[in-house]
Image (cartoon, rainbow, N blue to C red):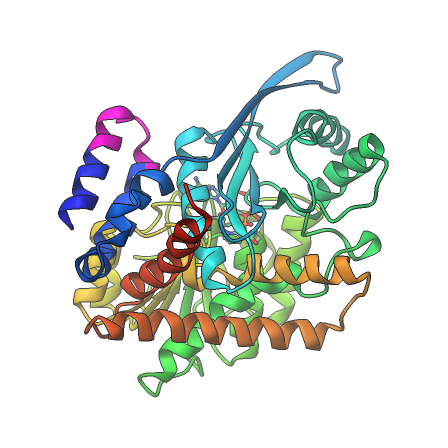
Amino acid sequence: MHKYAQGVYENLEKEMPWQKEFLQSVFEVFESLRPLLNSDTKYEKYRILERITVPERIIMFQVPWVDDKGEIQVNRGYRVQFNSAIGPYKGGLRFHPSVNLSILKFLGFEQIFKNSLTTLPMGGGKGGSNFDPKGKSDIEIMHFCQSFMRELQNHIGPDTDVPAGDIGVGGREIGYLFGMYKKIVNAHQSVLTGKSLNFGGSLIRPEATGYGNVYFAIEMLKTRREDFDNRNVMISGSGNVAQYTAEKIISEGGKVITMSDSGGTILCKDGLTHETLEFIMDLKNVKRGRISEVADKVSNVEYVAGQKPWQLAEASVALPSATQNELDLEDARELVKNGCICVSEGANMPTTPDAVEYLIKNNVLFGPGKAANAGGVATSGLEMSQNAMRLGWEAEKVDNKLREIMCNVHTASKETAEEFGIKDNYVLGANIAGFRKVADAMIDLGV
Ligand code: NDP
């Protein structure tokens, strides 16, 4: 790591040793910046690393709500407004019991560079709550979302901060949040993305993160004259990102042999069919069931309780699409041993740092989340554009734009690494390309 970055990192570590996920994401970015900091001293002169690692603002609030038994519940709400140098804060809301400030700061920090890579004018932010949507009724979800928005609405706006979904926040939650916002401010503004088509959403937004990751992986594979045709692909998760990743892989001729949730993994050695995937989508999105139920209903699918996908079978490609740090060094070793040639991150930071290093050293094409899963926020940016024009584009137009953006993110990540004499390192390229634009904007804007 460059000496300047090392000093800033050590201070952060001293100041907040408990913010493990945040420190992990800062470490990874700082390590990549070494060639850039060696070649240009202006970032140190303008104290960019000290400034870019402190959120411009953090809002923390209580979210009281009444459950179906009439009892009062209280959760914590957060919005981390990290960096607005290149546009309004933009990033999802996560509702999950594990949510804390460290996780939201890591996600917000990553978002700054991801949004920059899309080339759209969006700053970085992230928010959420330790609320657990699992097992709650629709009415409880609505009461929670309304209470969350009662406070959040003071801090967001179409030119200030535009949240979207993430783990535990899908179309249903966005609807309840937007409904409350609209009631309070008496305006139908583009203040959330991931909205339903009925009130200002964009076609292809639900598909965008999963499709985008596949488009990114296709570009990586092309550099080695490879493709998905007839290849075994392992996917983790069975939520929004995993579902549309699976859909696109199947239509590209690949075989999706795993999906999972926090309880375990389903394994289908023949590859999931479109029909089975439709069943999974209905099970997860409508019935709110568990992935284990697929094995009860579909004959060639087995369920492995308590296991992640990575060590269960041989696959050419792994697409982690559930959560952070879900693919570790042992998993990476097994993937390489079983012939894996490409890992592309649908989730944010799903691969541990030692696993990333091992994969890259072993010549596996590795797409880091801030590049590979940028399609979701990019299409959120396109939703904002359509809202501003009061127009709705056709699916094909949005999909074409998404594909073009993912190709550009791939090229920028690859060529930026090559500019510094390093080949096949998308981590380094994405970090430098994402950072440089934001840092230069911060310098232009003054202190
Ligand atoms: P969903 O809530 O739709 O799905 C999350 C999936 O991951 C579920 O299958 C869930 O299983 C599983 N999961 C969550 N936490 C854990 C855990 N601790 N251990 C094991 N499995 C877990 O979320 P998304 O699909 O939207 O998000 C998935 C990932 O993609 C996240 O990292 C998110 O930050 C990232 N991402 C999402 C974008 C989007 O547009 N939605 C954009 C860019 C990145 P269970 O149901 O059992 O909890």
Q: Against 261, is 337 above or below?
A: below
The foreground one among 340 and 143 is 143
Residue 406 horizontal/vertical position (percent)? 49, 71
Q: Can residue 315 be seen in this view?
A: no
Quadrant for the C terminus, please: top left
Which residue is painted at 38% across and 84% down in the image? 222
Residue 190 horizontal/vertical position (percent)? 74, 49
Which residue is painted at 56% across and 34% down in the image? 128
Residue 306 horizontal/vertical position (percent)? 39, 42
Which residue is painted at 76% across and 37% down in the image? 176
Which residue is painted at 30% across and 57% down in the image? 311
Q: Against 21, is 271 above or below?
A: below
Start-end of magenta stretch? 11-22
Residue 287 left/right relative to 119: right
Q: Is residue 432 visible?
A: yes
Q: Against 443, is 421 above or below?
A: below
Residue 21 belongs to magenta span: yes
